[in-house]
Image: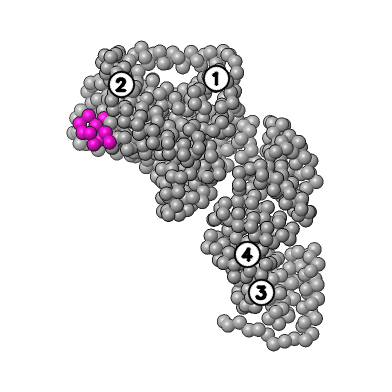
């Protein structure tokens, strides 16, 4: 794939040229993606990184190699332990501050751009082509998802180790140790993401495009055997951890479709890939049937798409001897997207921008070759001018595309601008409005969901939950009944139904509904905690203790069940165990005010009135509207024989919770005690 030409910078010394090349490859992507540094955790970041308890301790890193990518209880057939290790290291350095995560992503992307330059120059023997290919790769807008979103890191890491492996493969012709180095990095690529397996196909394509005779092109290279053998232990480890070879049937996007349906649908998927590579004006992030329709029969658009796909393959094969670089640029895209094509091996996505992070190099090389040809015929200024225009246009588009990953609201909103009826994003934006407390907007989007998909039960459940939170239980019940009618074995309706029963103090039915929901989904710490609370309110303290401990086991960094476990233990008079549970809760979250209230009640039971008073005052200093804190403090003051203060606190409690009859009785009791006052209990300063 070599082509000789005059360098555009003939009057500059070689060392200066190399320095300028290095500087440009660093600065251009750094500037282009700089606005992603302040982006929040978005979309899959929340599950994979932010809320992942397995990343919180460096001591847990070995366990990351023993669990699937989505965690022990959520097996989608993915195994990417090395990616998780980098997230754990990020967390150890910067915790929940996203700046460090984004900086690592950009740094890896710059390394990949350098490696693309080196490999392009190695095969083309032309720095002009290599530099343009590298820069187009560095700033292509399709890369925003992989670079600007933290969850895109598997693509970056797998590509980096694959490119390093390729570098070692090239060097191995001079030194066998480079070959071992290459095999090691290939294995690391697989541990970052399954797509690294395409490297065997890439090397076969290199052989096809670099050897002169067809015998040499088709004769198996003995070195390839090493990569095949390296894949075997990876697959053994992967299967032993995930229990499946590929993606489980339930996690496949097109897994239940016929072969022809997959071909027809993915022909439109590839058409979309070609469009976003050449004209990336519309980038949807989440490509579902709302963007690429499920297609079961031939149509004009399918036939056209298939013609384009096969025509490009034919051109690539036809030019393999005449123009090997052109052939390579075309065929490289097909080889590197083969694993995500959904034709022979259905995956968990239809198409995705992040999955073509490495394949984007094909169109970048193609553009570089075209501009080089323009330069070669004597139009050097036009070639350089077009390159500058393209790089500027792509950089601007990328810079603004990064803003879509600023936060979830921006991301989901960007999709809905392009596809107003996008079901998944409508669901997500409704949830965001609900979290922000903009309930009218949330209601509007939940109702829109029901209009979009009237037979989808989750829409009814979500709207019902919104009404429950507002106290409109009567509006929620018919929605939940409809949801259960549509999906009797869906947990989504049973959870809000259980909450209604709990508000009605019908704890028996609440427990039954929570248990039904728990039996239908993968164990979940929050749901387990709600079940435990319902059992606690029901009065079964031993069972409540067991269920609270299950919630803690599911998420050791979830403070709330530890606080409520302390309440259960306190009721059972296990005061030391209760205090231990509270201590652990406050280590996890020192701002959990409910823990201070429980501490107050606990210390009162231990007759440490000064300690109880201290904790309760600390809670009220942060939030004076905590009614239970006022009540507990009133009881403490009464025990300290500070009747005036006790009355004041109980009265404040009654003002905040006027329906509690017990508090009014307690106030009467305090007034009686005040008639026969005892000496006050004084606390040390």
* Residue in the image at 33% along x and 25% along y: 203
Q: CA distance from mark 3 to mark 4?
A: 13 Å
Q: Which residues are magenta?
A: 170-180
Q: Residues within 10 Å of mark 2 (few under 14, many from 20)?
A: few
User: CB of mark 1 within 8 Å of CB of mark 3?
Assistant: no
Give above or below for 395 relative to 274.
below
Circles 4 and 2, Cβ within 8 Å, touching? The answer is no
**Height in image: 135 above or below 406?**
above
Q: Which residue is mark 4?
A: 566
Residue 271 visible to the viewer: yes
Q: CA gap, disc 4 to disc 1?
A: 56 Å
Q: Residue at x 49, y 26 (%)?
A: 345
- Magenta span: predominant SS is helix
Upstream in the sequence, badge 3 or badge 4?
A: 4
Q: Counting residues from the N terminus, which is met first, the one under dot 2 or under dot 1?
A: 2
Q: Which mark is residue 259?
A: 1
């Amino acid at each position: 794939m070599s082509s000789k030409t005059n360098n555009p910078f003939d009057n500059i010394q070689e060392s200066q040229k190399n320095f300028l090349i290095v500087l440009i490859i660093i600065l251009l992507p750094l500037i282009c993606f700089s606005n992603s540094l302040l982006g929040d955790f978005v979309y899959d970041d929340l599950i994979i990184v932010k809320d992942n308890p397995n990343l919180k301790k460096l001591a847990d890193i070995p366990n990351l190699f023993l669990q699937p990518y989505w965690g022990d209880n959520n097996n989608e057939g993915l195994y990417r332990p090395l990616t998780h290790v980098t997230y754990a290291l990020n967390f150890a350095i910067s915790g929940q501050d996203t700046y460090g995560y984004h900086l690592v992503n950009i740094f890896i992307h710059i390394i990949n751009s350098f490696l693309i330059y080196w490999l392009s120059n190695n095969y083309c023997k032309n720095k002009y082509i290599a530099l343009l290919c590298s820069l187009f790769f560095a700033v292509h807008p399709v890369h925003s998802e992989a670079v600007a979103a933290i969850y895109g890191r598997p693509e970056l890491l797998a590509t980096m180790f694959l490119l390093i492996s390729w570098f070692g493969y090239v060097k191995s012709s001079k030194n066998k140790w480079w070959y071992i180095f290459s095999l090691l990095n290939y294995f690391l690529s697989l541990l970052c993401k399954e797509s690294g397996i395409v490297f065997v196909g890439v090397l076969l394509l290199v052989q096809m495009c670099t050897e002169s005779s067809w015998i040499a092109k088709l004769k198996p290279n003995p070195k390839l055997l090493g990569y095949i053998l390296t894949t075997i232990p990876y697959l053994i480890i992967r299967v032993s951890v995930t229990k499946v070879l590929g993606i489980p049937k339930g996690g496949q996007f097109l897994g239940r479709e016929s072969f022809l349906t997959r071909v027809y649908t993915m022909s439109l998927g590839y058409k979309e890939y070609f469009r976003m590579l050449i004209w990336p004006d519309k980038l949807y992030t989440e490509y579902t049937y709302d963007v690429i329709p499920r297609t079961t029969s031939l149509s004009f658009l399918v036939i056209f798409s298939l013609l384009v796909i096969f025509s490009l393959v034919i051109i690539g094969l036809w030019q393999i001897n005449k123009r090997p670089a052109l052939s390579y640029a075309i065929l490289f895209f097909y080889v590197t997207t083969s694993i995500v094509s959904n034709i022979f091996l259905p995956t968990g996505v239809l198409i995705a921008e992040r999955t073509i992070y490495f394949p984007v190099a094909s169109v970048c090389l193609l553009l570089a070759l075209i501009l080089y040809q323009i330069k070669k015929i004597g139009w050097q200024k036009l070639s350089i001018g077009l390159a500058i225009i393209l790089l500027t246009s792509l950089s601007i588009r990328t810079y603004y595309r990064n803003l879509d990953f600023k936060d979830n609201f921006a991301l989901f909103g960007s999709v809905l601008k392009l596809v107003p009826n996008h079901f998944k994003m409508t669901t997500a934006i409704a949830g965001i409005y609900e979290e922000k407390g903009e309930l009218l907007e949330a209601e509007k989007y939940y109702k829109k969901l029901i209009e979009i998909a009237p037979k989808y039960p989750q829409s009814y459940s979500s709207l019902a939950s919104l009404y429950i939170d507002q106290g409109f239980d009567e509006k929620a019940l018919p929605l939940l009944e409809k949801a259960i009618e549509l999906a009797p074995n869906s947990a989504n309706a049973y959870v809000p139904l259980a909450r209604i029963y709990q508000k009605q103090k019908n704890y028996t039915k609440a427990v039954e509904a929570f248990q039904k929901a728990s039996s239908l989904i993968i164990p979940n710490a929050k749901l387990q905690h709600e079940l435990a609370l319902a059992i606690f309110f029901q009065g079964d303290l031993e069972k409540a203790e067991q269920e609270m401990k299950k919630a803690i086991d599911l998420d050791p960094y979830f403070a709330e069940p530890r606080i409520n476990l302390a309440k259960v233990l306190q009721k059972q008079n296990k005061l030391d165990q209760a205090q231990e549970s509270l201590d652990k809760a406050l280590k996890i979250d020192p701002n959990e005010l409910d823990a201070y209230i429980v501490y107050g009640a606990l210390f009162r039971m231990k007759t440490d009135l000064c300690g109880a008073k201290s904790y309760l005052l600390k809670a009220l200093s942060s939030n004076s509207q905590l009614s239970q804190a006022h009540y507990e403090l009133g009881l403490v003051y009464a025990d300290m024989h500070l009747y005036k203060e006790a009355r004041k606190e109980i009265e404040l409690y009654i003002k905040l919770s006027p329906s509690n009859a017990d508090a009014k009785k307690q106030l009467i009791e305090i007034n009686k005690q005040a008639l026969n006052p005892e000496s006050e209990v004084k606390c040390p300063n």
